[in-house]
Each structure stands twice: as C-alpha cells, then as structure tokens.
Image: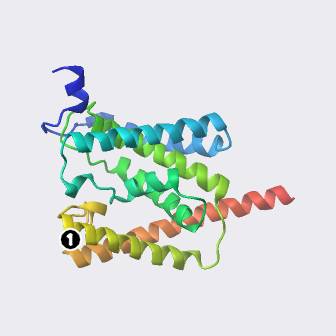
C-alpha cells in the first residue's frame, strides 16, 4: 500500500485498535487543556491551533467529498463539527460562547470514548478525530479564558439552545438516516427510539454544559476578585 493510500484510502477495513495506548487520549486532553489555559494569551499558541484546526477541516472535508461519503456521515451535524466551524468563524457573542462550551464537552467525549471510521491508523479520518478534537479543545478554552461573559439566567439559556440545536440535529437524522449527535444510536445508554434518544441525550448534555459553564464562571469570578484585591 502506498503512503497516499495509507492516509487517504476510501476502502473501509477496520477501525484502529488502541489497546494499551488508549490512556494517551484522555491524558492528552489534560495536557492540551492545561497548556491552553496557561498560554491563552500567546499569539503563537493561538495561531497554531487556529490554523491547525482550519487546515484539518479543509483536509477532512475534501476527503469526505473525494471518498463519496454519504450525507448520513459527511455533513457538519455532529456537535464537535459544528463547534469547530463556529469557534473559528463566528463573531464573539452568546452563540459562540455556547459552542465554546459545546466544544469542550465534545472534545472530552470524543477522546474518552473514541469512535473511529473503519480505516487503520494513520488514516486521515483517525488523525482528524484526534488532532481535530485537540484543536477544538484548545480553541474553545482559549476563547473561554479570553472572552467569556457572565450572563444572567445562563443555565436557562444553555437549556434552550441545547434543546433547539439537538432538535435540528435530530431532524437531520430523520432526513439523512444518519447518527449525528449520536442521537439515533447513542453509545453506552442504548437505543430507545428517536424521541427518547433526543430527550435523554439532550438532558444529559444540558446538565454537563451547565456544569462546565459553572466551572468557567467560577474561575472568572475568582480571577476578577484576585485582580481587584
């Protein structure tokens, strides 16, 4: 097999088996997370992850097109895919801040419970899954450290947006037959039908996002208090 085929083949075989190497994924999340908080104001650090994410998105979407992946798999309706584009391109504001929280959540889920395409490592889809979520975590944390705004009734706003976004994703699943947002066939909790899947995933996701938001807000308040002393 040529190097090109190794990276870009469209002939599925089997997903990579991590075995004992699995522990590197959650460990890498901690490392990237700590570095992103520490160097959030570093222009070089920010540029590395911004441009790295953009290049990664262009490469993987080009492969989706070249490999003729069906619309049930190739559209940007996974939470992480949506967050990747929004954190790069959207203007500052409530919408971007919400997806920064989603990006942190999605990165953790994706690398704690990785789901790879059926191509052996180092296929572009595997590299995309790992590097793409590193970059997403970094870009989202950088945004939250630098631009997070404390809002009134933020938990209720997170709830509204999550139910709305997930309704759009579930509609995409109905139209395409996909498993976007893992709401057609949720891992771990099992399949309980589209409506119950939507409710269970959305409730769990909402609770997690509210928790992440509370941690970020508490950190921001402590920082402001220490700066005013």
Q: State the residue in front, 104 or 166.
A: 166
Image quarter where the N terminus lies is: top left
- x 51%, y 50%: residue: 88
Residue 41 location, x and y as percent?
68, 43
Q: State the residue in front, 29 or 3.
A: 3
Left or right of residue 60, residue 27 in this image:
right
* Residue 221, above or below 25: below
* Residue 142, above or below 1: below
Q: Quadrant of residue 80?
A: bottom left
- x 24%, y 24%: residue: 4
- x 74%, y 57%: residue: 223
Which coloring applies here? rainbow
**Residue 28 in view:** no
Left or right of residue 159, residue 16 in this image:
left
**Residue 162 in view:** yes
Residue 202 location, x and y as percent?
36, 72
- Residue projecting furthest to the right: 229
Image quarter where the C terminus lies is: bottom right
Secondary structure under the numbered disc 1 in the rendered image: helix
Which residue is labeled 1 in the image? 174
């Amino acid at each position: 097999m040529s190097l090109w085929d190794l990276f870009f083949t469209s002939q599925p075989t089997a997903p990579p088996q991590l075995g004992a190497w699995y522990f590197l994924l959650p460990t890498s999340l901690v490392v990237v997370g700590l570095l992103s908080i520490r160097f959030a104001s570093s222009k070089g650090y920010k540029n590395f992850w911004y441009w790295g994410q953009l290049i990664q998105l262009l490469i993987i979407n080009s492969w989706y097109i070249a490999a003729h992946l069906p619309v049930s798999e190739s559209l940007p309706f996974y939470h992480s895919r949506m967050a990747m584009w929004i954190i790069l391109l959207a203007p500052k504001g409530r919408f971007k801040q919400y997806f920064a929280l989603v990006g942190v959540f999605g990165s953790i889920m994706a690398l704690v419970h990785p789901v790879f395409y059926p191509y052996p490592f180092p296929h572009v889809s595997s590299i995309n899954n790992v590097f793409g979520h590193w970059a997403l975590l970094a870009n989202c944390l950088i945004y939250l450290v630098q631009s997070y705004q404390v809002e009134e009734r933020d938990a209720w706003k997170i709830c509204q947006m999550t139910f709305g976004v997930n309704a759009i994703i579930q509609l995409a699943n109905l139209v395409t037959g996909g498993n976007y947002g893992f709401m057609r066939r949720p891992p771990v909790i099992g399949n309980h039908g589209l409506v119950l899947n939507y409710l269970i995933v959305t409730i769990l996701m909402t609770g997690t996002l509210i928790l992440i938001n509370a941690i970020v807000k508490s950190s921001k308040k402590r920082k402001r208090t220490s700066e005013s002393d």
